[in-house]
Image: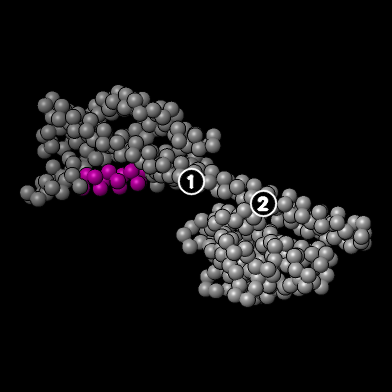
Amino acid sequence: MNQAHKLASGSDAPHPAGLLYGPERGSRRDIWRRKLIAALRIFLLWTAVGAFVAVPDMLDGFKWSETIGKFVESWSWALLTPAILFVDRRLISADYSVPRIVATHLALSVPFSVAHSYLAGLILYPIPSVWWNPLRSTEFAIYFYLSGWGTYCGVVGILQALKFYNRYLSSQVELARVEKRYVESHLNALRLQLEPHFLFNTLNAISSELDANPELAREMIEDLGTLLRQSLDCQGSKEITLAQELGLLDRYFAIQKLRFGDRIHVQVEVEPATLSAMVPSMFLQPLVENAIRHGLEGRLSGGSILVSAEHVDDQLHIKVVDDGVGLPPQWKIETSAGLGISVTRERLEALYAEPEGHEFTVERRKGAGTEVTIRIPLHSIGSEARDIAA
């Protein structure tokens, strides 16, 4: 936020002169090369201005003296432009303030306008046919001064507009960075909500087996330790590959298989091409946990869970299907108080916020049980690396 404040205040915002000169880094040869290119740009820019001013006078017939006079006036400003940029960069950009900008440039407009009049007069002096030279006539000196003053104000106005635009772009970039950091912190907070919930449920299951079956409890603790180590490896990532996610899910299944034995049958059907697809880290575990706790655990006969993933167009379709007791009659996803469902919804909304970026539905199956469907954009770790490089 401090950086955003600096950019908004203008102290660190890029100056339009940077478009001409570039950063003062590199060898002496590179610096001189950039300065020559900048000088050429300024010259061509003011030549274009001179042509724009001279063309209307040519419509009444070409007069060499008038045409060269227009170009000399523009080229005189080309010689003064580096000084204008230097003064604006050193004296004004350090402390951005609209009254200060206006006051400073009003004060500077007088010497710069006078300097332009004398400079143009000196260049045109060897041409006798240019009788309106400001050094030859006081009347035309006043005309040159007023014309130069208007041009100076126009140049300064364009310069300030470019500075405002640069500040706007800088603030937008910083705002995007802040929003990204906010989304990341929000995702981390959501994940931290899930982990204690999962640990509490797992530890509660382990404690229930300690007296009756210490060996089983010990195996569950070992599987839990392996799962936690793997989850820590993915802790700093918003997304991991589907293969990594299924690896974490496999350790969770191992814990549940120890608890329920043959009462729960797990099946995973995943297209090989989808294993490299990026998915939210540890988003399947709470969905499977819901299927076990609310769908299968209460049934003496247990049941089965199917986890599938397929590539459809440019999207990844994932399903978690169980044949348990199903959803309550009045259940709606919008009013669900379950932590796993609500957190998963928020994580998907934060990661894929663009329109049509994702779909998350929880529905009753026609026969029995529940079907969770997730649709997210399909992108692999390779494509993500290419996007970053681009």
The residue identified by callout 2 is: 191
Where 359 falls versus 63 (above or below)? below
What is the span of residues highlighted in magenta in the rendered image? 39-51
Q: Is residue 41 magenta?
A: yes
Task: Name which quarter of the figure residue 131 lies in.
Answer: top left
> Which dot, 2 or 1, sits closer to the camera?
2
Q: Earlier in the sequence, mark 2 or mark 1?
A: 1
Where 173 falls versus 342 (above or below)? above
Residue sitting nearer the eye, 69 or 53? 53
The residue identified by callout 1 is: 173
Disc 2 versus disc 1: distance between alpha carbons?
A: 27 Å
Where 263 falls versus 283 (above or below)? below
Indicate the amino acid at tag 2: Arg
- Looking at the image, residue 345 sits to the left or right of residue 217; the answer is left
In the picture, the disc for residue 243 is none
Residue drawn where x is 46% and y is 59% of the image? 355
Residue drawn where x is 51% and y is 61% of the image? 357
Residue sitting nearer the eye, 194 or 354? 194
Where is residue 274 shown, x and y percent of the image?
63, 71
Indicate the amino acid at tag 1: Val
User: Are discs 2 and 1 less than 8 Å apart at CB?
Assistant: no
- The crowd level at tag 1 (other Cα within 10 Å; few <14, some 14-19, many 20+) is some
Where is residue 148 shown, x and y percent of the image?
22, 32
Residue farthest to the front, as pictured: 329
Q: Secondary structure at mark 2?
A: helix
- Looking at the image, residue 111 sits to the left or right of residue 380; the answer is left
> From where the camera sits, is residue 168 visible?
yes
Residue sitting nearer the eye, 262 or 19? 262
Residue drawn where x is 20% and y is 47% of the image? 52
Q: Secondary structure at mark 1?
A: helix
Residue sitting nearer the eye, 202 or 73? 202
